[in-house]
Image (cartoon, grey):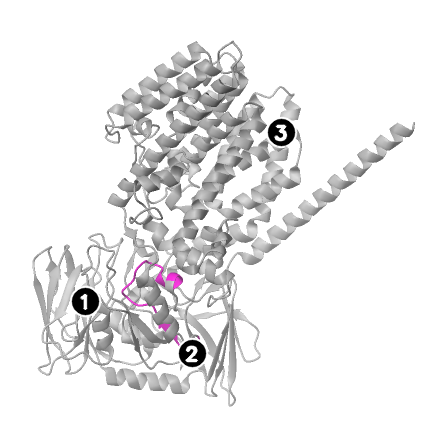
């Protein structure tokens, strides 16, 4: 309710016109949920192993394990495809509700007490600062919010010697749902278990036995999750290297500020609990009703975890020994959970009296004083925090009274506590929405634009005879998952190294430091990757920097060879420095003229010009990966052939198509894709006007003039010698090739790890690589040759072996438990008969 109220206050989807699809929520998570919808309804191009829509064929299982193995994810199937944004929102709310319910269950399991207080504290945990500022737009992280109290329950069962099988299954579900936050939740639950053992009244031996039970249960559960976790691990091993970040601790004043309502930042731990819950947490060290050892151990635990977030070595431990990009305090939900547990411990042992309340109020005043000098505090923060703290103090004072408490007083306390919690959390949610939209990229929810794109792609789709590219005019970085087709676009933490480097060598652009590769609108690469249809959409009107041009998507077609072609046998030289020459190597023919030009260094707002001579009628292509701005070919001839695609894509008209280049000043962050500019005029003189918006460079060799006649000849040659039949079934490609001398079959798919191929009657073996594509050597044959390639995600076999072994152990444990139960019942009957 509080999340929905906060979104309504901020007028955010689905309660207003503002989008909630910021950063990776719009770029990754919603598109992946849309693809899951297609998988569940049997409308995807691939299966669980291969995603044929993205990256010209990518490994799907690592992405599923990273983004979509939550038990909540299949709920998308219950919604219409056009309501995918609403489906993800409902899943988000359901996860928060589940987290609150499980935390309340844990609290009552730790120590009996008033259920409504446990429920309110469970809600405080579900609506903690981490959840409403970080978790709501990183949907899969919310599974960690649920996992932490669940794993703490597993620790309690181990302590009591109960439910070992259920405990192992809970660990499995947690690690399968989202291994990243499950790792953090497991660390936090382990620390709580150690604290519980230190305060346990049993002997040292009993404590060690409980610790061993917990360790075995966790190991068994992680083993059962190995088929998913190990596939993800090997997927990261083969992914394009991400950003290396140096950890920087947050200012303590900011840490204190993030404990209070209506504060937000991207670079500090989100530790907000409503101030009533925070006040109750702070009473723990001063509450004499709580046993001294419990007070000391839990207080040290909470403070120690908070300090560990700020120290480099322990920070690395929390984040699996790698400082994450972006928010560096992704483990903050664990500390929020420990604070809620501390609050419950203080209340359930005995409601804090006047002295603990006064002492806690003094500590809270110090926190507010430290926070007041932080730039994160606004004019509403301290007043709202004071109202919440006063309400919490009133509730505690009424509940701590010695006289009997009438039902009306209890009802008033519950209503006051929950009202303050909802109001503070709604306000904090609204502020987080506003500030997040102000500093993060955002994307429009599913609408008419995406519907038109999807319809255009569906009308042109002819897979696997040829690919249909969603095109350069992208809406999000994973357009193929959202609207269909089989394109180059792909954005994931698992984007393969070979895909990113191959497309970069061919003139492709990318963002997110190489992990978000973009579509490459180029005739040669369309031929190489069998892109027979390409969608050209007007610029996305949701993005303010785009020209507001109307129009519907336009589909252009091109004659292309089949998905499997034949190249000469023998080694081929590696890619060089020129994207034009690299395209020719992969095509197998010389089709470009690359004239000498004078290098240009660009500055924002200062126009520049490139001049050169090219064959009349050729297509001008500009490859300037470190240039940001627009480029226009002067006196461009009427756009025909491949240039028509450029004109349609740019939306600038056929007479003078515009190439729009987007690059970052830091060349490792973002580079621009090669762009078509039009047909060289009858004078043979090429003049390109540059309008830069950032500092950059256009080097010698940046201009390539494509001979379209030679390209058509190459297409005919590849069609003649290529496969006569191609069948794609899930993760298997089968092709029939005409007879010929010794040669190499090339599958227009990136040679990511996991491909195995066989030609004729030979045994399958790891596929070869032909300049980054899947290749199979073919022997001299006078009869047609059948080539079969299968894909299996790396890590799946070993993960299945570990998971199978763990399953056998689990079955053995069940059998042993059943035998013990039967023996116990038999002994009981014998004693009764005596």
Q: Which mark is residue 659?
A: 1
Pick whichever, 146 or 251, lies toward us: 146
Q: Residues within 10 Å of mark 2 (few under 14, many from 20)?
A: some
| Mark 2 residue element | loop
Q: Which residue is mark 3?
A: 159
Q: Which residue is mark 2?
A: 465
Residue found at x 60% / y 30%: 156
| Mark 1 residue element | strand
Q: Which mark is residue 330?
A: none
For residue 763, above or below residue 70: below
Pick whichever, 705 or 377, lies toward us: 377
Tell me how far mark 2 sits from mark 3, CA to CA.
Answer: 60 Å
Label 1 close to label 3 by CB (< 8 Å):
no
Q: Which residues are magenta?
A: 464-482
| Mark 3 residue element | helix
First reached walking from the N terminus: tag 1 or tag 3: 3
Please provide percent x and percent y for residue 405.
51, 15
Pick whichever, 501 or 688, lies toward us: 688
For residue 535, above or below residue 164: below
Please provide percent x and percent y for residue 201.
62, 19
User: Which of the two discs, 2 and 3, sits closer to the camera?
Assistant: 2
Magenta: main secondary structure: loop
């Amino acid at each position: 309710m509080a999340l929905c109220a906060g979104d309504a206050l901020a007028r955010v989807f689905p309660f207003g016109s503002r989008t909630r699809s910021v950063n990776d929520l719009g770029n990754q998570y919603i598109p992946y949920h849309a693809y899951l919808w297609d998988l569940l309804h049997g409308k995807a191009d691939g299966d669980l192993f291969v995603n044929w829509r993205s990256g010209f064929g990518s490994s799907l299982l690592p992405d599923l394990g990273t983004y979509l193995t939550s038990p909540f994810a299949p709920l998308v199937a219950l919604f219409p495809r056009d309501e995918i944004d609403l489906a993800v929102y409902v899943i988000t709310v359901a996860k928060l509700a589940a987290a609150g319910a499980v935390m309340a269950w844990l609290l009552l399991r730790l120590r009996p007490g008033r259920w409504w207080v446990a429920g309110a504290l469970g809600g405080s945990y579900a609506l903690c600062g981490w959840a409403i500022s970080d978790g709501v737009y990183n949907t899969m992280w919310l599974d960690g919010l649920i996992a932490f109290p669940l794993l703490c329950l597993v620790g309690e069962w181990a302590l009591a010697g109960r439910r070992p099988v259920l405990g192992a299954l809970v660990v499995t579900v947690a690690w399968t749902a989202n291994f990243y936050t499950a790792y953090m939740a497991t660390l936090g639950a382990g620390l709580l278990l150690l604290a519980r053992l230190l305060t346990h009244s049993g002997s040292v031996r009993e404590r060690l036995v409980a610790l061993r039970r917990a360790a075995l249960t966790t190991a068994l559960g992680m083993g059962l999750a190995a088929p998913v976790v190990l596939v993800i691990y090997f997927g990261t091993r083969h992914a394009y290297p991400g950003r290396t970040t140096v950890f920087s601790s947050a200012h303590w004043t900011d840490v204190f500020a993030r404990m209070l309502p209506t504060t937000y930042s991207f670079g500090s731990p989100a530790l907000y609990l409503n101030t009533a819950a925070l006040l109750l947490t702070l009473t723990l060290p001063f509450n004499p009703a709580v046993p001294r050892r419990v007070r000391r151990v839990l207080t040290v635990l909470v403070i120690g975890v908070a300090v560990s977030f700020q120290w480099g070595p322990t920070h690395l431990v929390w984040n699996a020994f790698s400082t994450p990009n972006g928010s560096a305090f992704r483990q903050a939900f664990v500390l929020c959970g420990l604070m809620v547990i501390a609050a419950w411990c203080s209340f359930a042992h005995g409601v804090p009296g006047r002295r603990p309340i006064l002492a806690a109020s003094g500590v809270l005043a110090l926190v507010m004083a430290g926070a007041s000098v932080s730039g994160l505090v606004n004019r509403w923060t301290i007043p709202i925090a004071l109202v919440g703290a006063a309400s919490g103090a009133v509730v505690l004072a009424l509940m701590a009274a010695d006289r009997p408490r009438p039902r009306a007083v209890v009802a008033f306390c519950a209503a006051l506590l929950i009202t303050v919690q909802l109001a503070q959390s709604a306000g904090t949610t609204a502020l987080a929405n506003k500030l997040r939209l102000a500093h993060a990229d955002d994307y429009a929810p599913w609408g008419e634009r995406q519907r038109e794109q999807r319809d255009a792609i569906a009308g042109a789709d002819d897979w696997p005879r040829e690919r249909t590219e969603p095109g350069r005019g992208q809406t999000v970085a994973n357009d193929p998952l959202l609207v269909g087709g089989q394109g180059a676009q792909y954005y994931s933490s698992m984007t393969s190294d070979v895909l990113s480097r191959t497309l970069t060598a061919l003139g492709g652009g990318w963002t997110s430091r190489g992990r978000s590769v973009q579509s490459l609108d180029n005739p040669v690469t369309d031929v190489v990757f069998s892109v027979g249809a390409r969608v050209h959409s007007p610029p996305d009107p949701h993005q303010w920097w785009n020209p507001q041009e109307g129009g519907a998507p336009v589909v252009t077609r091109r004659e292309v060879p089949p998905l499997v072609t034949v190249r000469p046998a023998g080694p081929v030289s590696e890619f060089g420095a020129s994207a034009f020459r690299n395209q020719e190597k992969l095509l197998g023919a010389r089709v470009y003229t690359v004239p000498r030009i004078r290098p240009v260094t660009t500055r924002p707002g200062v126009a520049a010009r490139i001049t050169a001579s090219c064959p009349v009628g050729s297509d001008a292509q500009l490859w300037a990966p470190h240039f940001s701005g627009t480029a226009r070919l002067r006196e461009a001839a009427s756009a025909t052939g491949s240039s028509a695609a450029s004109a349609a894509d740019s939306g600038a008209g056929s007479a003078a198509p515009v190439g729009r280049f987007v690059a970052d000043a830091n060349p490792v962050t973002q580079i621009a894709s090669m762009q078509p500019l039009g047909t060289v005029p009858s004078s043979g003189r090429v003049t390109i006007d540059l309008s830069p918006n950032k500092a950059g460079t256009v080097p010698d060799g940046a201009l390539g003039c494509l001979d379209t006649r030679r390209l058509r000849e190459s297409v005919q040659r590849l069609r003649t010698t290529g496969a006569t039949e191609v069948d794609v079934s899930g993760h298997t490609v089968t092709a029939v090739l005409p007879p010929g001398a010794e040669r190499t079959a090339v599958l227009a798919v990136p040679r990511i790890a996991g491909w195995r191929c066989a030609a004729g009657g030979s045994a399958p073996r790891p596929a070869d690589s032909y300049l980054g594509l899947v290749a199979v050597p073919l022997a001299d044959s006078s009869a047609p040759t059948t080539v079969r390639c299968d894909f299996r995600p790396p890590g799946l076999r070993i993960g299945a072996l570990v998971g199978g072994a763990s399953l056998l152990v689990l079955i053995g444990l069940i059998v042993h438990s059943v035998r013990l139960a039967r023996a116990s019942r038999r002994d009981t009957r014998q004693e009764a008969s005596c």
